[in-house]
Amino acid sequence: MNAKFFLLILVCSFLSFACEKEDEEHLGDFYTIEDIPLPEGLMPEVGGMDFLPDGRLAVAFHRGEVMLYNPDSASWKLFAYGLHDPLGIHALNNHEMLVMQRPELTRLKDTNGDDEADEYLTETDDFGISGNYHEFAYGPIPDGEGNYIIGLNAASNNAGVWDETRGVYNPLGHTENGMFSPVPYRGWLMKLSQAGKLEPFASGFRSPDGIGFDQQGNLFVTDNQGDWLGTSKLYHVEPEKYYGHIASLVWKEGWEKDLSTIAVSTFDSMRTKAAVLFPHNIMADSPTQPLVIPDSIDFGPFGGQLLVSEMDYPRIMRVMLEEVQGEFQGACISFMDSSGLTLGNHRMEFGPDGSLWVGKTAYAWVGDKGIQRIRYNGGTPMDVLRMHVTPDGFDLIFTRPVNLERASDPDNYHFSRYYYQYHAEYGSPRTDEQAVKVESVIISDDRKKVSLKLEEMVPGYVYDLEIDSLACDQGVRLINNRMFYTLNNLPD
Amino acid sequence: MQSLRNYFFLSFLFLGGGAILSSFFLQQAPEQAKREIIIKAISGLQYDTVRFKMSPGETIKITLINTDEMAHNMVITKPGKREEIVDMALKMGSEAEAKNFIPDAEWILASAPVLKPEEKFSFTFTAPDSEGVYPYVCTYPGHGAIMYGAIYVTSNMMPPLANDENIPPQRRGNTDDNQANKAVHPYPNTFPRMYRAFLPDTGPASIAVGMTNKLSYCWDAGTCRFRYLWKGGFVDMTRAWSGKGKERADIVGTVFYREENEAPFRLGSKDNIPAPEFLGYRMENKYPTFSYRLDGVEVSERITPTLEKPGMKRVMQFKNLKAPIWFVRPKQQGVDIYVNKGKWEGDYLKLSPEEAKEFTIIVTEKKPEI
């Protein structure tokens, strides 16, 4: 055999081998996770986190403490204590913060500069509590215009209502099955105006633990799978709209009807659907806080997008949103999966240095304890940057050019579609689940955009995409290969 | 409809799943199970039984009952495989549900499928002939890290519970970090101290204040009023903090004074129940001074312990009053009640605006008569 020819064969087989065996890049190559040291005696279940202007982190914990962490000295200082299930915190300045605890929104104020609150002032307690354990309270999230949004969980039928409630008891709101709303405004988002008045903002929530604004001032709220929620979801919330969990409706002005006499189709016609569904048992079982990655920091290629933390998996999700027919919809994908991340991801906050701090909780559900810090090391992970719907399929925009040969093969893309039922039962199976064939693939000249034409696009379904093997042109594996697009509307 | 569907699901588990499992074990172990172990999945991601012993080769019946409000399964593996199976289950992807979050692995010895709340499932299990610690674990996503137990296949004793690395740390005997003798906060357990918490015999927005380690009170921020005073201790938060917060904290000691009246202070007229508005509290020497409004009138209330007899001193301030107020005589027996200002008119103490600017109520336990 001709030596030259032999060499050619050798090179060819080597090349094809390189193509077969993708180098494994992990997200851990781009992002580093560390555990934050914690003081002795602390039950480190995090309800709220926010940075003070001076760079210290204020954290509210399950047993009622608010503590200040100085990242420079890695030291903790007790700021306040004795609070009831604090689940949100917002720093006003270096000496003052708002904390959402079960019975009220409280302003904690250090008036003598010793870094310990001496005033615990009620900002608002103008909502009901029935003594039901499930009536958690979340927020306050500033809307950028001087107002705050807070969220009021519905009560659980795993427990009752006390004889003595705060707030008027409404028997219409004390239903036997599922979550209920016996006192005002359980299952609502509320808006605290600059003038200090607490007003109903939007209804139809079961467990709105995660409240956050994007950079354009759009409000997004997560809710948890359960009754009336076939799977967990992310809503784009606008004033006065109703989002689907029926318990809250009894506090709608002038409401007098027994909820059990109303047809599901009526509730269905009233509701605003979620922008993004998080498939249960696959993607998220308990999504928590949405947090935008600000363009002002360098946290990798995903600036401007929302991260959503998740309690039941070692996962932070990323949401790729777009406006179609005037409404938000889009896809969720993992941002970080394992790579040292623990469970219980509950509260997230970007530090002054652009690192992401993640507080954990469990509350005897699935979860964990502690605080982790995620730093971006630079570089571009091979990932799906954006997913856009087209009239007959989807465009995938990648962070790096794809491998032409691989990406051109329609068999690399496995779509299935299904929907979740809207009903009183707890959760929903994936319904009418079927595979959807990819008919053609077009790749852009820069090899960063892959346009997929599907045999069928049906609004009202989740499009579940798993990409088999889609190396970038350096033969590096795609880091997250499964995403879920909630197709509410098709573009023209 | 749902319950009917559950019933069919359950029947399937029993008739289908159970039959398959038991026939499998019948082939493997013709010996009949002589004893039954009942394991309950309970609140807080736990099995109620975290370990038990079997003799090598012994056959038993295991019944898993889900008494929790979440779904759970149970997988028994060969020694040392607990963490691996949990990890594998998490990575199962879309087939996970259909396979009950139980991955394919030859070293799985037995399993119970995912049970919804209130379902149960029985299966026969024959211990391997080789001695060892065989873990069982819930592989439902997120549960496995803390929800597990151990089968000791041995003819020897099991190790002391406190040192048993094969069971979850929080189940190793007296290591409960809620115990009063252990630090439960990152600050010292000194008095005075306080909690806002669910407490007995009061509204849901209440506050417990331990003035000393032997003298405490409950104040209701919902109705803005004093509720009760007790001696002998503070509160035990164990039940309130365990689980999801369903239970109220327990009072430690004996309540000896209650104010049962829905409005101990009356403004405008004796019969008027003023509308309360809680403004918060200010900490001074670790004692809170409560601020609130009654019918728009600002009130402050500071409670400190009395020294000689168990009791409290309550300094009240009503600001900018234009008319007299009334304090309703508490009905409580066994205490002495003294107010330093005002004039009793039957069961009402009348205080002029000037007197109500600041007055003191002292409540002390009566010495038992000899």
Image: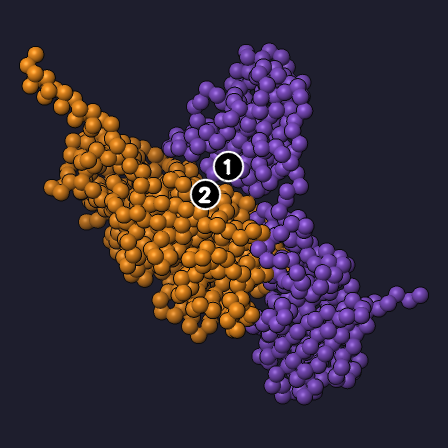
Chain colours: A orange, B purple
In the rendered image, which quarter is residue A472 located in?
top left
Q: How many marks?
A: 2
Is residue B356 toward the left or the right of residue A95 in the image?
right
Q: Which residue lies furthest to the right in this view?
A: B370
Pinpoint residue A429: horizontal percent, then vertical percent. Answer: 42, 37
> Please, is residue B137 above or below residue A301 in the view?
above
Tag 1: residue type? Ala
Callout 2: few (<14), some (14-19), or many (20+) C-alpha neighbours within 10 Å?
Answer: many
Task: Tell me which residue sits at (53%, 53%) in the image.
Answer: A39
Task: Tell me which residue sits at (58%, 24%) in the image.
Answer: B133
Q: Is residue B174 visible?
A: yes
Residue A343, label in figure: 2
In the rendered image, which quarter is residue B313 located in?
bottom right
> Please, is residue B37 above or below residue B237 in the view?
above
- Chain letter belonging to callout 1: B
Q: Residue furthest front?
A: A73
Q: Which of A234 and B287 is in front in this view?
A: B287
Tag 2: residue type? Leu
Is residue B195 toward the left or the right of residue A123 in the image?
right
In the rendered image, which quarter is residue B220 located in?
bottom right
Q: Is mark 2 on a helix, strand or loop?
A: loop
Where's the N terminus of chain A, which quadrant?
top left
Callout 1: few (<14), some (14-19), or many (20+) C-alpha neighbours within 10 Å?
Answer: many
Q: Which of A382 and B19 is in front in this view?
A: A382
Q: Name the residue under label 1.
A: B145
Task: Tell me which residue sits at (63%, 37%) in the image.
Answer: B172
Q: What element carries label 1?
A: loop
Pinpoint residue B242: horizontal percent, then vertical percent. Answer: 60, 47
Q: Is residue A184 visible?
A: no
